[in-house]
Image (tube, rainbow, N blue to C red):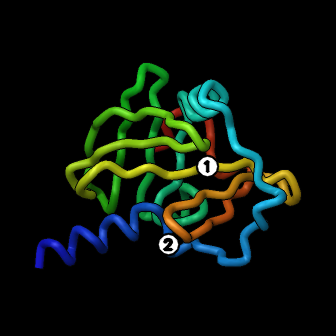
Amino acid sequence: MSMKLGIFAIVGAIGFAGINNAAADDSSLKPFTLGELKTFLSDKSYPTGGTTLKNGKGAFYFHANGTLDAIWKGSKETTTWTVEDKSKFCYTLEMFGPKECIQLMKNTKDGGYVQIYGSKKRDLAADSIVSGKQF
């Protein structure tokens, strides 16, 4: 039972409720460099479980010092985050299980961003990732 709950939490945390399988095709996606992604996410709030902070089930806040604050359905946890090659940010949260990495790409055709987790893509509007801690 707990394994099923863990898998459900992981799937929900990355926002499958907001998945858009019609997300930008690969030719319109541009990766961030390591430095660009670290700078871009630092001191920003990022929606989880939805496409905006208001319609999501949670959020991440990326401190510039590498600390990550997470909230998911009212549960809060603090951990660390890193950036990796291929425009990915990674973290480990006890509430979700083992290390996860999410790829975040710039959408050069439609603006905004595309989040990729495994084979699933989700469009994020340019204003969905906002400055400051919003939770």
CA neighbours of label 2 inside 10 A, class few (<14), some (14 to 19), many (20+)? some
Q: Quadrant of residue 40?
A: top right
Q: Is residue 3 above or below residue 106?
A: below
User: Quadrant of residue 80 in the image?
Assistant: top left
In the rendered image, the quadrant that contains the C terminus is: top left
Q: Residue furthest top?
A: 65
Kindly identify the residue that appears in the image at 30 percent across and 74 percent down. Answer: 8
Between the C-alphas of marks 2 and 1, the distance is 15 Å
Q: In the depicted view, which residue is nearer to us: 126 or 114?
A: 114
Question: Which disc number belongs to residue 69?
Answer: none
Residue under label 1:
104
Q: In the figure, is residue 89 to the left or right of 4?
A: right
Mark 1 surroundings: few (<14), some (14-19) or many (≥20) residues within 10 A: many
Q: Could you say where residue 36 lies in the image, as x and y percent from the top left?
A: 66, 29
From the image, tell me which residue sits under label 2. Answer: 16
Please identify the quadrant where the N terminus is shown: bottom left
Q: Are marks 2 and 1 in contact (CB under 8 Å)?
A: no
- The secondary structure type at the circle numbered 2 is helix
